[in-house]
Amino acid sequence: MTSAKSFFNWIKEAERGHLTAFLSWSAFCIYCIIKITVLSVDTEYTFFGIGSTELLYICTGLGVALGFTEFFYLLQPKKLALYYSLPVTKTCIFWTRYLHGLFHFLLPLSLSMAILSIYQSSVDLTFYPYILSYTSKSILVYAGVFLLLYHVVICSVVLCGGLIPAALLSTGFLCYFHLLINHVFLPLSQNCFQTYYKSPLLESLYACLVPFEFCRTLCGTFLFDKTLVLTYTPAGSLLLTAAIWILLLFCLFALGQKKRKPEMAGKIFAFTLAERTTEILLTFLAGLLCTSFLFHITNVTQTNLGLAVLFSFICIAIVSFLLHLLLEALVQDSHRILLRRKMQPFLTGAAAVCTSCAFLAGASAYDSYFPQSEQVDSLSISIAGLDMDEDMYSEIMYGNSYATDKQLDLYRFSGEAKALGMSWLQSLIESKEASSRQPAYEEASYTTATVCYHLKNKKEHYRVYALSKEMFSSFSSVYETNEYKAIAYPVSNPDYLGDTSKDLFTWSDGITDIPLSLSSDDKKSLLDACSADVLQMKMESLSEDLPTGILTIESQKSGTATEILVYPFFTQTNALLQSIGIDTAKSIADYPIISIEIFTHYSVPNGYNGGVIRNVYETPEEIEAWKNRLVPEEFDVQPLLYPLSENPKVKIENKETNSYAEVKCRLKEYHKVN
Amino acid sequence: MIELYNLTKYFGSLCAVNHVSLTIPDGNFFGLLGTNGAGKSTLLKILSGILTADEGTVKIDGVSPSLCADSKQSFFCLPDEPYYFPNASLETMAQFYKRQYPNLDTDSVSYMAEALNLDMCFPLRTFSKGMKRQAFLILALCAGTRYVFCDEVFDGLDPIATKLMKNLFRQEMTRRNFTVLVASHKLDALQDICQNIGILHKGGLITSADISHSTADVYKMQCVFSSKESIEELRKELYVIHCHTDGYFSTIIAKGDLQTIQQKIQEKHPVFSENISLTLEEIFMTQMEENGYDIRKVFL
């Protein structure tokens, strides 16, 4: 029989179980039916290809299922004996199985994508221009996801001799780097580096080495906007990473299947090298997890480095040795040799200790890092609580980095603010205030400054510094630059809004919105006045006054609304507004208040009800006592400079309509009122 | 012809086949004998390409099966516990093997199955152990290969089925140039069909020879003596390989010229004496003794 004949003969033999075909075709059939049903009612937020989380799960599941069903014979000694005794090469059997699995994934995937794209284009005209690009890209990225998982499972089956070890090894392939980066390197960085905020290197490693993470990114499942989904093309680096993973695993199992000995079926590992590598990697990970945990609970620093190293070494040595004994007991056959490879756990444990000590040793250099000004292309600064609302500030306080990242993207300086920012940071680092996060200092620290140095060589270095009140006050030099204000208050540039002659101007005091009837010249004058006031504004002024109102400019062209906060110290703006009949001094206290409902929160033990006290003040005396402390929620824009507390709900009577309006407010501190 | 040269196979630190060199001539029923763990099955698996030898070469008709898959069409391997697909019937398996061995005679499979009262359409999983063995022996016989390698060939067969299968093997060997290599530790099952044997012990080949040639000067005499001293005297006078007394009956296996042996026995005035044929077990023991092995250590 020729090789080609034998190959096609074995392709037919691979069909025998029908399980692969059944799994794949039925999964895609069900997917098509569900998607067609959903697309018939919603084409805005339903995506059948890129952006579909369901398809990502299907491809992942099929990758795993098909990998096991196609190559399960490698784990069955009796079946192996039958196949290998037949007039066909081992390689032929292996590759026919590989192609069989691939065929039964790619064909139904392509067909289902084609059917769904035709269906969507028939019900959604906006999809029509993307029919070819979106469908082909979808097939490509989901085939990539399938191939990755398929290869991971094949590799595990080739390297292992049993189903459970193969399943565990697959899990290891998928989770190892997640554990190493997120549960070892990240906690170690956070514990050892006092100025650690985030590391682009760790983030890049996580994005590249954690298969689920880059599969999610590859498939665009983080996108929700239809236009973004339809035009989404994965980044070249992402495709390259996927290709490297797929090829690397392919080479590994292609080589492995050639060298694999059939008698290893039934054992835990089919290769001694795989056995040793797994033992080393697991012991190393366990050692590092142990270190990470110890550093976390003992709060080690450079001051107690020696003790920490000694303590860690003892603990890691014990953990590594016990884990090694356990693994050896599992992998060794009936001829068990006690203390085989006895140096291995100690060397691996030592590597774990060295790795964790490297973090401690590098902490000083990390925390005192300050690049040369000429190396820095731009500088991003985000100060927690400055130019953000209370909700954003609370998120930062709770450790959510989203708000800070958003601020860092926005507040990026490359001119005057960068130069002043660099000198401010230098003085900050030199004073050592920012490098201290000892408990005593924590209490003393006023807020934190998160910084990103964007270097000219495209590298980024993030740091977070604790700030004292004095250091925060000295930030005013940066705050009062035109560059900073252009970002924080875009209206400081008079040309920012362009032609506003036809735009709608509205004044809001937090309770009532008043449309302004202004000529083109009046509008321009008002904007110029705002610009001048913003440029003259001092940072310390923000700790003295809250906005009195908001000037909203609604574009008649784009429909977008721009809001300008007007403070009492905006003399020119206030004068102009007063000249057109706006009472800029009018506050919520000037409205007829019916009641004030205040919720006071206190802590209760877990499992107990309560924690909230609700007080309603309705008498004129009570209202009089509270009303001057009330501030509409929209004006709570400087939680650090002008902190407000509680969340009262205020009912204000509208005598014209004989109704009342409920306004969400905040409370000023007593001393601010008096 | 099958040629094995210096074949060695290790399972970890255990040497399962230890430098075995052997030649199996064509047209023979070759028995590979040995105790459990002697390396018989491993040797068969290496021969059929299931396992790869760590050292040495295997050549079947001058070609190494591990290098040329097509050369595997010249043999059919029947392991101790053959694999069949879930729910597969004899017919399904015959179709499967037909695709691998184009010379497989499906008509003969049907004919033999009918003769042995095996239903071709019933799933093999419903068959008893003996019926499964019969089914696979039929497939092996009808595959049209020049060689058949069987592990524990008649294991699980009742005496009638064993006899029938032996006849089928004999017919096939008469009809064409057909070589059978069987591995077994049940010597009685191979006694009347084996022409050549190879004896394995702890992975090593102790001996390999044609039964008729290797036992040409070994005789088994059954005698009854009036006194026990006669036996002791014979032990000294003859080259006695094995001697066993059960009641009045004494069995002596001795090496030498038949006339001399008979003359020495007659000198002791036996009540009864007769030359009977050697069993395979006795041949096996003879060979072992000749090669200097202590039988009791090997088999007892």
Image (cartoon, coloured by chain):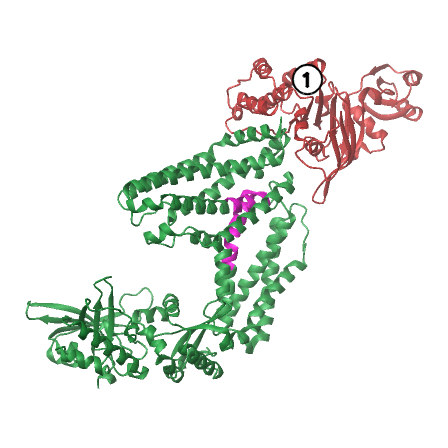
Spot occupied by residue A232 in the image (x, y as percentages of width and height): 39, 52
Place residue A482 in its image quadrant: bottom left
Which chain did the renderer colour red? B
Identified by mark 1, the residue type is Phe
Place residue A422 in its image quadrant: bottom left
- In the picture, measured across the screen, residue A111 lies left or right of residue B2, that is left
| Quadrant, the C terminus of chain B | top right
Q: Residue at x 54, y 49 (%)?
A: A169
Q: Residue at x 37, y 48 (%)?
A: A52
Q: Sort mark 1 into few (<14), some (14-19) or many (20+) by Cα contacts within 10 Å.
A: many
Q: Can you say whether B90 is above or below A606 in the image?
A: above
Label 1 is found on which chain of the structure? B
**Is A169 covered by the magenta stretch?**
yes
Q: Can you say whether A239 is above or below A86 in the image?
A: below
Circle 1 SS class: helix
Spot occupied by residue B228 in the image (x, y as percentages of width and height): 87, 23
Q: Which residue is most to the bottom?
A: A674
Residue wearing tag 1: B169
The segment highlighted magenta reads A150-179
- In the picture, measured across the screen, residue B165 lies left or right of residue A642, that is right
Place residue A541 in its image quadrant: bottom left
- Seen from the viewer's position, the closer of residues A660 and B32 is A660
Name the colour assigned to chain A in the rendering. Answer: green
- Seen from the viewer's position, the closer of residues A140 and A9 is A140
| Quadrant, the N terminus of chain B | top right
**Is B182 covered by the magenta stretch?**
no
Q: Can you say whether A287 is above or below A614 in the image?
A: above
Would residue A626 be visible to someone looking at this image?
no
Spot occupied by residue A292 in the image (x, y as percentages of width and height): 52, 66
- Seen from the viewer's position, the closer of residues A476 and B234 is A476
- In the picture, measured across the screen, residue A474 lies left or right of residue A40, that is right
Would residue A610 be visible to someone looking at this image?
yes
